Every structure is written in C-alpha cells, then in structure tokens.
C-alpha cells in the first residue's frame, strides 16, 4: 500500500513539474528578451471578406497572404507603408468587428531566441453608427528562424 502511494506521489510530482514548465512559455520568452525595431503599417484596412467574428493573431511572411487580409487605404495622398518581403515579415492583431471607436496601438516588440513578444494597447471609445475591425500590423526584420518563432501578443 505504501509502495502504491509512493509511486502515485512521484507520478503526481513529475506531471506537476512538467505542467509548470510547459504552462509558462511566456516567462521563458521574457528572459533575456531585448527590444526590437519595428515599423507600424499605416494606410491599410482589413478586407471586408475576412471573418472578423473573433480576434485573430497573424504572422504573415509573404505578400499574397497579406493581401488576403489587408487592402491599401491611401489617405489624402499618403501611400500605404511599403513592406520589403525579402527582408521583412508582418505580425498583426485583428480584434472582432465592433461599432465602438477603437484604436489598437503597437507599443513595443521584444525578441529572444525563437520568441517574439508584441505589446499593444487597445483604446475603446464611444459608440458609432458604423462598424469597423480594429487592428494593428507591424513589420519586423526577417531573421533565419522567423518562420519557427513563437509570437506572444500582450495587451497592456
């Protein structure tokens, strides 16, 4: 009986210790993370054929995929931000469609090996007579391990 209780206790400790490490990948990503330069993409809109019923977190590494989500929205002569797909990739956060004036503002990006942490702020305003899809999209310098990087989206 004692032997079974000891085995069960050891199994419980092993499962719990594995679970703690696996449940905290953000904590590991923050260790040694340094700020990374990024470019905020301006003068784009979310296409009206994109399902925006729930929030989406995107990592986009080619123009074709980008064009499935976003279209150019030049404003009074100012062109959309250029993206150099050979040297950059895009991460974006799309929030659900809303009828409240909402702004998503990128704050900072931190990188550690294999990880990207994207900090952003959401400001919600008054009710409007129209709906919109709040989003923020940024371009980062492409690294060798970009496609395998884990991206964390943190609202502050």
Image (spheres, rainbow, N blue to C red):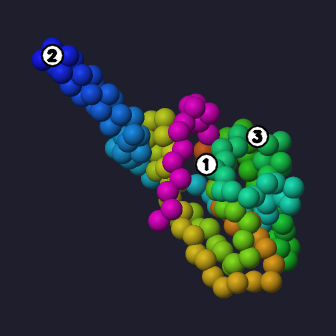
Residue 47 placement, left or right of 139: right
> Which of the 4 image quarters holds residue 120?
bottom right
Residue at x-position 79% and y-position 60%: 46
Kind of element beneath mark 2:
loop
Residue 126, position in %: x, y?
66, 85
Q: Which residues are magenta?
A: 142-156
Residue at x-position 84% and y-position 66%: 73
According to the picture, the residue beneath numbered tag 2 turns out to be 1
> First in sequence: mark 1 or mark 2?
2
Count residues near mark 3 (Cα–Cα under 10 Å), then give few for <14, some for 14-19, many for 20+.
Answer: some
Residue at x-position 66% and y-position 56%: 55
Residue 2, position in %: x, y?
12, 17
According to the picture, the residue beneath numbered tag 3 turns out to be 62
Count residues near mark 1 (Cα–Cα under 10 Å), then give few for <14, some for 14-19, many for 20+.
Answer: some
Kind of element beneath mark 3:
loop
Question: Which of the two residues, 2 or 32, is positioned nearer the viewer here?
Answer: 2
């Amino acid at each position: 009986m004692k032997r079974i209780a000891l085995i069960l206790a050891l199994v419980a400790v092993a499962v719990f210790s594995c679970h703690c490490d696996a449940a905290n990948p953000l904590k590991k990503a923050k260790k040694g993370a340094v700020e990374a330069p990024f470019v905020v993409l301006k003068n784009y809109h979310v296409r009206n054929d994109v399902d925006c019923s729930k929030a989406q977190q995107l990592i986009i590494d080619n123009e074709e995929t980008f064009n499935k989500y976003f279209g150019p929205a030049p404003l009074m002569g100012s062109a959309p931000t250029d993206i150099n797909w050979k040297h950059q990739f895009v991460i974006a956060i799309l929030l659900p469609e809303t009828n409240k004036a909402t702004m998503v503002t990128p704050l900072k990006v931190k990188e550690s090996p294999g990880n990207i942490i994207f900090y952003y702020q959401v400001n919600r305003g008054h009710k409007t007579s129209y709906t919109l899809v709040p989003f923020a999209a940024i371009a980062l310098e492409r690294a060798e391990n970009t496609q395998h990087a884990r991206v964390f989206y943190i609202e502050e």
